[in-house]
């Protein structure tokens, strides 16, 4: 077992060393001085490197085995040379050959990365052999940004001098993912344009009569042909088109070939915006080498219709910048269509049934990602026969019903929530017909045909047939839940990073507060671990410093949060789930950064202990209840969402009737005053017995006020006022809703004998208000504006 663990750790270490880490300008300059081809993933701290490409890099490295190929990750935040990439590098891969920029790829496009690595390695070997020269490029995107900045500065200078802003040439470039015009003010107000690419059906394919067949295959991939013109290129046109290949041995033959007969020049786009059309078409035509295309992508257009080397049937623009140059070259007067704007994303339920899940899970998931779906929800689970019958109850009475429900309950399956702009139809299109014979005949490449099980008539996949059905089915497999999330004392310094990851994972924070637990509260919170050896150490650790508690809302929140935090042991988490929170922020099993409820029942119990009742408000009353909750929030619930702070202040100001009240409510977290709760004034005289409690309160003052410096005070009368305000908070909801919490031991002015017990409770006055009276207070602190998930 120990040997296995060592081997696993060794593999992990080897993977980490795959990419050199560059974090300073000095380290950057050192890398730039070294020989070889560096593929550098430029990232910023807030998002991190592109982990999804690590496997691709490792495969390329293993396949090629070329010592010239090296990988690195570079932190733009701290490297001066990458200053212009800050805010523009997710993800961005720079190819440097001995300190010279030779290629840039934006987006985690593994086929394009593989092609570029191969091409640039070949070129670098030629440079080292002296048979070619290294060709330095400029990053088109950064150059465009520089142009934009310069143009804006010129316009500002001209405006300051009283001269009209000069008109630019109307040149189109891509900024933040959209085509924009750098022309006069009328141009700047125009809508964004679609992304396009230029394609050429070369003379060999035209002469062979394959044009119609190629055009049909292009359309079958959902690609729109905006322009199709047959023309024979002049030598000048061909030379300008292939100027980047002028140092190749076959350059003259290529020019002669391209001018030997007519070609078809195409302008292509796809969908509403044309997004990613350049990369999609490059993938469709396949590698430049026909031999390589036939070996690696036999279904590509070059593999089907190409002959050899440069006579490979088709050409496609390799970048946005090249596409714009080729468009201007071939069709200088062509107006690119306006982008239609992206529709809202759809969600659909996808089920990989037990047999396919057991044998083809990874392959199916890969196909889902390649089809452009985002996996928003994912769960592996087993259904009982009754659950399967309930899910498919609309099919009850059909002859296949019993076999369907039996197959569905025969073992683990995978449920997925897929997101895409046409998710419902897109997924059903991938699935193919429900009847297997029909699927195999009409759609042999569909999932149902490809992964059919012999002698089984039930297909292996499910997809929702409408948006309404998708929502209903998603609710069945991923019910809306709330769970308790805890950021432990050892990780509180990284709470902002953790909260950002919480939001990125699709959770809404319904409520949160930061506090230091007393030992008694920690013991109660972890009571289910009482029999464990580590129980005392765990309790002491949880009471050692401030802790952040959060109520998270999302579909399948309990399992979703547990999946995000990873295994209990951070070392195991680093091996099995390196992007989990415990892997990233945990130290050891005790100090493992975060905690999550183990099941929905425990989640409800924990939420009740810490927050009381915080059921999300109805959609109709959400805004009204949100304002009420914020305006009544006690000093114990922190972190009002920034967008709600103005409403918070307005709600408090509206309640202010006296200048004195305004002073009391000017703190960050407002408290009810005596004027706001007139009935409490009648009970004020009953506070006199509290003079007996003051010495004990002073003794426990440090412990109860340590995490909340803003509440520190040296005057005993303020302790009286604090307890009086706590009681006012407890009485207010009773007057409004006539509701009484189960914990009846709360302080009641009309029962003096309970006051005599108060000194024993003052060890953690603020915790008492949080835990023993939370059922009332929970209605006041219901949400932070995010509770309705």
Image: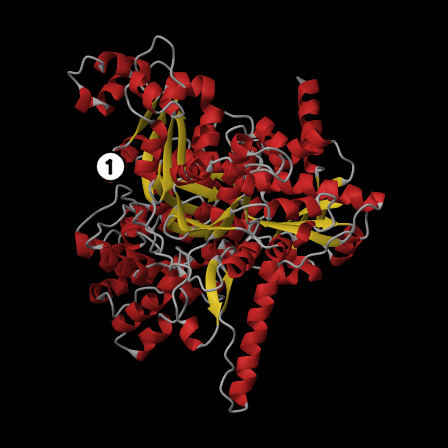
Locate residue 589 relative to residue 248 in the image: left or right: left
* Quarter of the view holding residue 750: bottom left
Locate residue 370 relative to residue 125 in the image: left or right: left
What residue is drawn where x is 39% and y is 68%? 190
What residue is drawn where x is 24% and y is 18%? 386
Q: Quadrant of the N terminus?
A: top right
Where is residue 400 shown, x and y percent of the image? 22, 14
Q: Nearer the viewer, residue 655 or 86?
A: 86
Residue under circle 1? Answer: 466
Q: Please determine whether, in this image, residue 330 is positioned above or below residue 530.
A: below
**Residue density around tag 1, few if under 14, some if 14–19, many if 20 or more, within 10 Å:** some
Q: Nearer the viewer, residue 740 or 291?
A: 291
Where is residue 474 shown, x and y percent of the image? 30, 34
Whether residue 532 is visible: yes
Give the colouring mode of the picture.
secondary structure
Whether residue 545 is visible: no
What residue is drawn where x is 53% and y is 54%? 323
* Quarter of the view holding residue 676: bottom left
Looking at the image, the residue that sits furthest to the left is: 397
Where is residue 767 shown, x and y percent of the image? 41, 49
Locate residue 447 relative to residue 388 in the image: left or right: right
């Amino acid at each position: 077992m120990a040997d296995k663990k060592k081997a696993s750790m060794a593999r992990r270490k080897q993977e980490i060393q795959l990419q050199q880490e560059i974090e300073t300008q000095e380290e950057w300059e050192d890398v730039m001085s070294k020989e070889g081809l560096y593929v550098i993933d430029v990232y910023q701290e807030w998002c991190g490197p592109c982990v999804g490409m690590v496997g691709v890099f490792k495969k390329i490295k293993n396949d090629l085995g070329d010592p010239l190929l090296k990988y690195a990750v570079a932190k733009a935040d701290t490297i001066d040379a990458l200053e212009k990439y800050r805010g523009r590098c997710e993800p961005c891969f720079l190819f440097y050959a001995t300190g010279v920029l030779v290629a840039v790829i934006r987006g985690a496009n593994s086929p394009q990365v593989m092609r570029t690595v191969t091409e640039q390695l070949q070129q670098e070997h030629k440079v080292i052999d002296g048979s070619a020269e290294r060709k330095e490029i400029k990053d088109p995107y950064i150059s465009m940004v520089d142009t934009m900045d310069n143009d804006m500065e010129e316009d500002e200078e001209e405006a300051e001098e009283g001269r009209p802003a000069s008109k630019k040439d109307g040149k189109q470039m891509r900024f933040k993912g959209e085509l924009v015009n750098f022309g006069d003010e009328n141009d700047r107000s125009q809508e964004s344009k679609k992304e396009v690419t230029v394609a050429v059906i070369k003379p060999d394919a035209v002469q062979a009569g394959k044009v119609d067949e190629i055009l049909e295959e292009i359309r079958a991939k959902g690609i729109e042909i905006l322009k199709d013109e047959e023309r024979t290129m002049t030598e000048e046109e061909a030379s300008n088109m292939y100027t980047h290949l002028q140092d190749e041995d076959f350059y003259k033959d290529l020019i002669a070939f391209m001018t030997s007969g007519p070609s078809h020049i195409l302008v292509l786009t796809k969908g509403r915006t044309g997004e990613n059309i350049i990369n999609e078409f490059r993938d469709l035509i396949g590698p430049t080498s026909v031999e390589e295309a036939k070996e690696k992508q036999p279904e590509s257009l070059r593999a089907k219709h190409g002959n050899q080397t440069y006579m490979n049937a088709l050409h496609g623009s390799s970048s946005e910048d090249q596409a714009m140059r080729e468009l201007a070259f071939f069709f200088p007067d062509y107006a690119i269509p306006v982008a239609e704007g992206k529709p809202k994303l759809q969600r659909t339920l996808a089920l990989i049934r037990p047999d396919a899940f057991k044998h083809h899970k990874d392959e199916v998931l890969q196909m889902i990602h390649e089809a452009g779906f985002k996996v928003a929800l994912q769960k592996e689970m087993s259904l009982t026969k009754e659950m399967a019958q309930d899910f498919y109850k609309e099919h009850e009475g059909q002859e296949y019903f019993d076999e369907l429900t039996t197959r569905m309950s025969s073992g683990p399956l995978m449920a997925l929530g897929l997101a895409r702009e046409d998710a419902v139809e897109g997924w059903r299109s991938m699935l193919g017909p429900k009847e297997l014979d029909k699927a195999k005949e009409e759609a042999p490449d569909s999932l149902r045909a490809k992964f059919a099980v012999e002698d089984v008539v039930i297909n292996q996949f499910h997809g929702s047939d409408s948006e309404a059905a998708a929502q209903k089915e998603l609710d069945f497999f991923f019910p809306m839940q709330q769970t308790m999330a805890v950021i432990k004392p050892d990780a509180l310094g990284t709470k902002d990073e953790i909260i950002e990851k919480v939001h990125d994972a699709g959770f809404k924070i319904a409520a949160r507060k930061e506090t230091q637990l007393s030992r008694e509260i920690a013991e109660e919170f972890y009571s289910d671990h009482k029999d464990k050896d580590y129980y005392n150490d765990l309790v002491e650790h949880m009471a050692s410093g401030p802790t952040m508690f959060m109520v998270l809302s999302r579909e399948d929140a309990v399992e979703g949060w547990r999946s995000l935090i990873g295994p209990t042991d951070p070392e195991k988490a680093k091996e099995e789930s390196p992007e989990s929170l415990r892997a990233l922020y945990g130290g050891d099993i005790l100090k493992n950064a975060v905690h999550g409820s183990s099941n929905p029942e425990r989640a409800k119990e924990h939420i009740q202990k810490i927050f009381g009742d915080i059921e999300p408000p109805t959609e109709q009353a959400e805004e009204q209840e949100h304002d009420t909750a914020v305006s009544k929030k006690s000093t114990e619930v922190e972190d009002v969402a920034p967008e709600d702070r103005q409403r918070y202040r307005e709600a408090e100001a509206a309640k202010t009737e006296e200048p004195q009240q305004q002073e009391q409510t000017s703190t960050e977290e407002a408290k009810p005053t005596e004027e706001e709760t007139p009935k409490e004034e009648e009970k004020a005289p009953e506070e006199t017995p509290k003079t007996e409690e003051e010495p004990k309160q002073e003794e426990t003052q440090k412990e109860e006020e340590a995490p909340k410096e803003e509440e520190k005070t040296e005057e005993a009368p303020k302790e009286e006022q604090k307890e009086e305000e706590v009681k006012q908070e407890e009485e207010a909801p009773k007057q409004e809703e006539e509701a009484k919490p189960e914990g009846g031991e709360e302080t009641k002015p009309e029962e003096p004998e309970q006051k005599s017990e108060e000194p024993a409770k003052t060890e953690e006055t603020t915790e008492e208000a949080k835990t023993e009276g939370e059922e009332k207070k929970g209605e006041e602190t219901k949400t932070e504006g995010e509770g309705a998930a």
